[in-house]
Amino acid sequence: MTRVLILYGTTDGHTRQVADAISETLALGGLDTAVFQAGTIAPHLPEYAGTIVVASVHAGRYQKDVEHWVRAHAAELAAQPTAFVSVSLAILAKANPKTRADLDAVVARFLATTGWRPTVVKHVAGALLYTRYGIFKRWMMKRIVARSGGATDTSKDYDYTDWADLRAFANEFRRRIAAAA
């Protein structure tokens, strides 16, 4: 059976849910998937027909464990279909050209730093997990989100991920794997 590696980095846990949703969709399409958090294991890339890296943006960068892993495996990743899934709240402001340019710059810096050229880059909206944040982070996130007209009721969480669009992306990646085989 064809195997796909899904490597993720998460700060508050939502990116793990994104990685799991991609895995479930690929599995429904007949692929075997392995989901690993960056920094916890060193999967052997030649065992996989493709790799999806999922990471979230915090303070203008992705998780260090993801960056280190991708940099260490950039040459191996070049030999297979790959995708980079960037999870952020900035994508919600996609109508704002400056915000989109800033987000594209974050991705470009990550790719330049790691030397990786993924087959496809996918932007996914993340979540505001106010109830999981400490007091300072909750206050900061509320201020940031208020500027863009987002939800500021800190007594509950907000999931902005378009799960149907994420499943469509996973199915498209599955077709890329099949075409490469």
Image (cartoon, grey):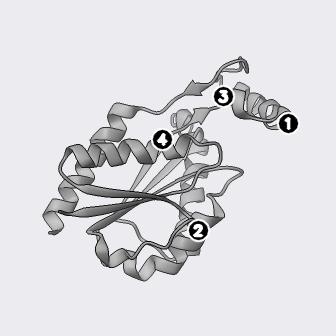
Q: Residues within 10 Å of mark 3 (few under 14, many from 20)?
A: few
Residues at discs 2 and 4 in contact (Cβ within 8 Å): no
Residue, x 53% and y 45% (percent of image)?
15
Residue identifier under label 1: 136
Residue identifier under label 4: 17
Say which label, 2 or 1, has the lower sequence index: 2
Disc 1 residue type (three-letter) = Phe
Q: Residue 27 placed where, x, y %?
A: 25, 48
Disc 3 residue type (three-letter) = Ser
Residue, x 43% and y 72% (percent of image)?
43
Residue identifier under label 2: 67
Mark 3 or 4: the one toward you: 4
Disc 2 residue type (three-letter) = Glu
Disc 4 residue type (three-letter) = Gln
- In the rendered image, the vertical position of residue 36 relative to residue 22, given as above or below: below
Q: Residues within 10 Å of mark 4 (few under 14, many from 20)?
A: few
In the rendered view, does 45 fall on the left or right side of 105? left
- In the rendered image, the vertical position of residue 38 relative to residue 58, given as above or below: below
Residue identifier under label 3: 148
Element class at badge 1: helix
Q: CA distance from mark 3 to mark 1?
A: 19 Å
Element class at badge 2: helix
- In the rendered image, the vertical position of residue 14 relative to residue 81, given as above or below: above
Q: CA distance from mark 3 to mark 4?
A: 25 Å
